[in-house]
Image (spheres, coloured by chain):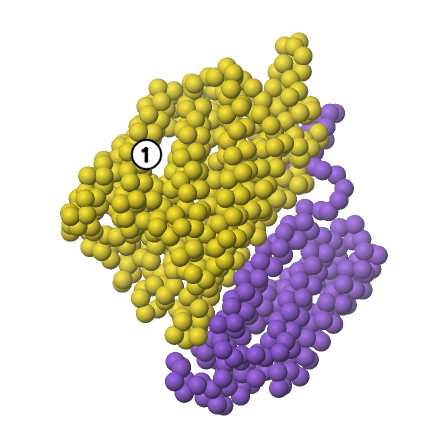
Chain colours: A yellow, B purple
Amino acid sequence: MATTALTPATTYRSGLYEWVTTTDHKKIGILYVINSFVFFFIGGILALGVRTQLAVPDNKLIAPDLYNQLFTMHASLMLFLFVIPMLAGFGNYAVPLMIGAPDMAFPRVNALSFWMLPLGGIIMLAGFLVPGGTAAAGWTSYAPLTERAYSGTGTDLWLMAVLLIGTSSILGGVNFLVTIFKMRAPGMTMFRMPIMAWTVLVTSVLSVLATPVLASALIMLFIDRNYGGSFFNTALGGNAVLWQNVFWFYSHPAVYIMILPAMGIVSEVLPVFSRKPLFGYKAFVFATAAIGALGFSVWAHHMFTTGSVYLPFFSFMTFLIAVPTGVKMFNWLATLFRGQLMFSTPLLFALGFLSMFLIGGINGAFSAAVPVDFALHDTYWVVAHLHYVLFGGSVFGVMAGVYYWFPKMSGRMLDETLGKIQFVLMFIGFNMTFFPMHVLGLDGMPRRIAMYAAASGWGQLNLLATVGSLVIAASMLPFLWNVFISLRSGKIAGDDPWEGNTLEWATSSPPPPYNFDHLPPIRSERPVFDARHARHGETGGHA
Amino acid sequence: VSASTAVVTAHEEPLATGHVTGGISNPILGMILFICSEVMFFAGLFAAYFNVRNTSPVWPPAASPTSVPVITPELAERFNLHAEPWFGLVLTIILVISSFTCQLGVWAIRRGDRKGLVRAIGLTLVLGIAFLLGQAYDYSQLGFGLADSQFGSTFYTLTGFHGAHVFGGAIMLSVVLYRAMSGQFTAQHHDAVEATSLYWHFVDVVWVCLFSILYIIPTK
């Protein structure tokens, strides 16, 4: 190989300097993942605070204003600094490898996108240090609660932080799109791209088109608060519902930003661990695009009870989204059907995703019916629904991705036993926490309340949910221990420990900075499968 | 990046750097996508403008001694931009002309005419700065501020963010001008010129829309 001779002369750089200044998409991807986990743990601790307060009726442990800060920051960190960047991190790591590119299209912009995130996180959390505390109006920051009269400096910090994070999303989206459109290896046509690349593509379109609308909303609110503007201040001639419209115009598509790449991860894991090609590749691609497109026409289903949106349209479009989602569910199940299932940890988490996301999808469809929504709006039913899609869906998908790609990222395998312990604890803890919330919601328990009376009868189920949240927290211990010992002494992974299908398994683990010395011929969406079986003298595996 | 190119040249088979050949270049595609996101940013602000306008019984808001803050008859008079659109029209003409000069620069460098590029981009930059100075002067003469009712909020937010984009475009033009003067562009390699020009046209189009809704479409 001529490779060694061509390695440029290296000057010594410390490891830290290398990581801080890197423009390598793999290192940036890993930075995204680590950064997201840090905020996941902070957000998780805040959630434990929320659950502790709600464990028993009439609890006076946490004062209501602090409680408001806890749930607001929990949601803000989890959505803006964990789920979205975590999935962007996997996209960063995997997509250039999967399409056979040497890096992202704009490596320095990529580094900029990443470094805005920790900065945004610090600004957001700095709210705990200012008088009045952090933002406390919920992650949706509805006016007039967020107007100057009702909230302090923490809300300004929140606005600035989300603006930074949003800018990061937009730049990341542009970068992904150019990478996917322009940097594919010879033979890697659009319809041979891994589903993960497709989901990142659609997600990027959503980021590029929806996030700037959020930016405009944040700026208008900032002007209202600091320069005497009157966009959302009804007393000054503005319109409070306007905030909800511009906010949800971003934040509903953002729901798909938070789930599509997780669907992509699951769509990579299921075929590999069932030893079958993905069932209905093209249907899956079109379903992904359809979800992205329909995602722009359903934002007002968060606003049914405002009385200022056209209910039949938004209700119908919301039901319509269930169709492409159902297509995907069918494809996943058909991929598993009669496969030679290999119950490694990535598959367990992917199955967790399928089952929990199914519940989250179904209870979401309930709320799409206008009369049902009027009864359930702002109750714990909604909290149950969103956690079934975002935790049961996205977090299980993320965990599947961690176990699937850790060997590629680090060169070592994660321990299977610890992984299975983590999965069982997380699955049980998750359902203990969030399933009772369906019942609490139907009983009429409103979300975002700091205290409830014993006479309400909500005490037992809330206690169960709190115990469940501790089980979820406990499930993180085997995970952290697993990462720690596996990095030190895990089994050496080799190039392709799972017998994968996609191009990242055609290079070394971890890959060299330029990704590939040699690419196999790309003649289907499973080039590594094809190459492996061509080598073994079997017939090609074209699906 | 240098490592990967080096590896490719050393191998006979097509390797990992295989980009899709031909078509639009990466920086220009990146700029087009970025402009798409900017379109959506202004769409958010424009939507807010129309929503606030629709909420108000008359537009521009009428004098009202009871509202908070009070809209005096003089202030309501000032809101009537339709009565005096001439300065805004001059600004519009300046910016539209600058779009043409910018495009002349692009056409010049496509022919390999570096002097033509420098002249055209220089002129575009001068016009852009003239627009910004004109807008600053206009602000000083309007007689109402950002906190003066929903009219002030929407007017200054829309025109202010547009002005900020013109400022950003002027910085990009300055960089292009500097690079053009040091002879960095050729007929084959001038992505920065093309991308900057696209951005400048976008900023121009936003202003034409702004001028139309603030000065031309009927009051209600």
Kindly identify the residue that appears in the image at 47 percent across and 17 percent down: A341
Q: Nearer the viewer, residue A425 or B159?
A: A425
The correct choice, above or below, for A354 with respect to A48 in the image is above
Kindly identify the residue that appears in the image at 38 percent across and 63 percent down: A143
Q: Position of residue A308 (x, y in %)?
A: 45, 62
Kindly identify the residue that appears in the image at 52 percent across and 16 percent down: A338
Residue B93 placement, left or right of A288: right
The correct choice, above or below, for A213 with respect to B48 in the image is above
> What amino acid is at disc 1?
Phe
Q: Is residue B26 visible?
A: yes
Quadrant of the rendered image containing residue A345: top left
Quadrant for the N terminus of chain A in the image? top right
| Numbered disc 1: secondary structure | helix
Pointer 1: residues within 10 angstroms few (<14), some, or many (20+)?
many
Q: Position of residue B121 (x, y in %)?
A: 73, 66
Quadrant of the rendered image containing residue A178: top right
* Residue highlighted by disc 1: A430
Instruction: Using the image, name the chain to which the residue with label 1 belongs.
Output: A
The correct choice, above or below, for A241 with respect to A489 in the image is below
Q: Nearer the viewer, residue A160 or A388?
A: A388
Q: Is residue A517 visible?
A: no
Q: Position of residue A243 (x, y in %)?
A: 44, 62
Quadrant for the C terminus of chain A in the image? top right
Kindly identify the residue that appears in the image at 70 percent across and 37 percent down: B19
Q: Residue furthest top?
A: A537
Q: Position of residue A431 (x, y in %)?
A: 32, 33
Q: Residue furthest bottom?
A: B74
Quadrant of the rendered image containing residue A468: top left
Q: Nearer the viewer, residue A17 or A40?
A: A40
